Image (cartoon, grey):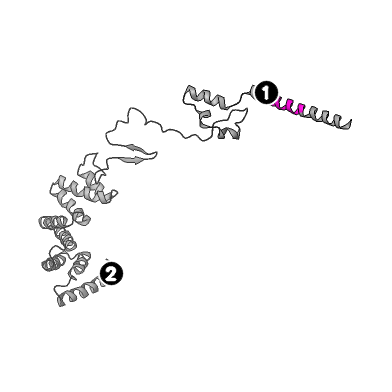
Amino acid sequence: MPPQKNIASALEIDRLATQLATNPRSKAFLPLAEEYCKAGMWEEAVGVLEDGLKYYPGFVTAMVVLGRAYDQLNQPTKARAVLEGAVKLSPENLRAHRTLIKIYAAQGLTEEALKSCHVILAMNPRDEEVLSLQASLGAPESEKGQGAPSPKSVEVTGQVTVTPGTNTASGPPPALESVPTSLPDIPTGKLPSPLDDQKPPQDVAPSSDSDVVTTKSHQPSHADTVARLESWLRSLERQRRDRSTRDTHSGS
């Protein structure tokens, strides 16, 4: 540690130690213990933490620091007991699990070590240190890099759902129906008249033979239309002749 940091650490230790001496029930014991750990003063850290935990039993952070200090002093039995107590109170405490992995591995407790690995990897799947430890413990290939259990299904692009256990080796998933990008061509010829939209419903889709007959009776045929036009023209011709006759008689 550089001289300046040593001086700063010594000053901080002196300040916290004085505060704790003034008030033994002060929570200053925890930062003081952490300063001792930074300085490598593990025995001093253990003494301060043990005293502080008498006033604050169940203080998880202090328990984790104490477990690490025990581990550094080569007291794995005490370290394991304290850290397992911390994990019971805080199951996802990563610092506790990280130290427990090393203790379990050293004691040959592979299953327990892998469980702690899984807890950490569930929170941080890319933790290189824990991934390396997990591999060194001989974890099965299916478990390497895994943390929490994977979800039952994962949604992928195209709203297709892949479910574990589904046989995908038989071929690709069925293709999605394509959406036409253009309208179909309209055949050339006579365009429908706007008046066609105004036809009675029965002209569009008659539901029975009687409807067909009724529909035809309402629509005059081409011959009927011509006959009416001829009758109208003959009537006009008669009116002209009658008018000409009246004009001739009146002039004489």
| Viewer-nearest residue: 41 or 163 | 163
Residue 153 is marked as none
Left or right relative to 149: residue 228: right
| Viewer-nearest residue: 86 or 89 | 89
Which residue is drawn at the image coordinates 15% and 57% (left, top)? Answer: 89
The amino acid type found where label 2 is placed reads Lys
Whether 201 is drawn above or below 209: the answer is below
Q: Position of residue 79 (x, y in %)?
A: 13, 57
Quarter of the image for residue 90 reads bottom left
Task: Return the disc, 1 or 2, that comes first in the chain's sequence.
Answer: 2
Q: Secondary structure at mark 2?
A: helix
Quarter of the image for residue 164 reads top left
Which region of the structure is painted magenta?
228-238
The amino acid type found where label 1 is placed reads Ala
Asked if the stretch drawn in magenta spans residue 229, the answer is yes
Which residue is farthest bottom?
Answer: 22
- For the N terminus, the quadrant is bottom left
Q: Position of residue 5 (x, y in %)?
A: 28, 69
Asked if the stretch drawn in magenta spans residue 12, the answer is no
Q: How far is mark 1 from mark 2, CA to CA?
A: 118 Å
Q: Position of residue 130 (x, y in %)?
A: 24, 49
Which residue is farthest right?
Answer: 252
Quarter of the image for residue 150 reads top left
Q: Main secondary structure of the magenta part?
A: helix
Whether 48 is drawn above or below 248: the answer is below
Residue position marked by numbered label 1 in the rendering: 227
Residue position marked by numbered label 2 in the rendering: 5
Q: Secondary structure at mark 1?
A: helix
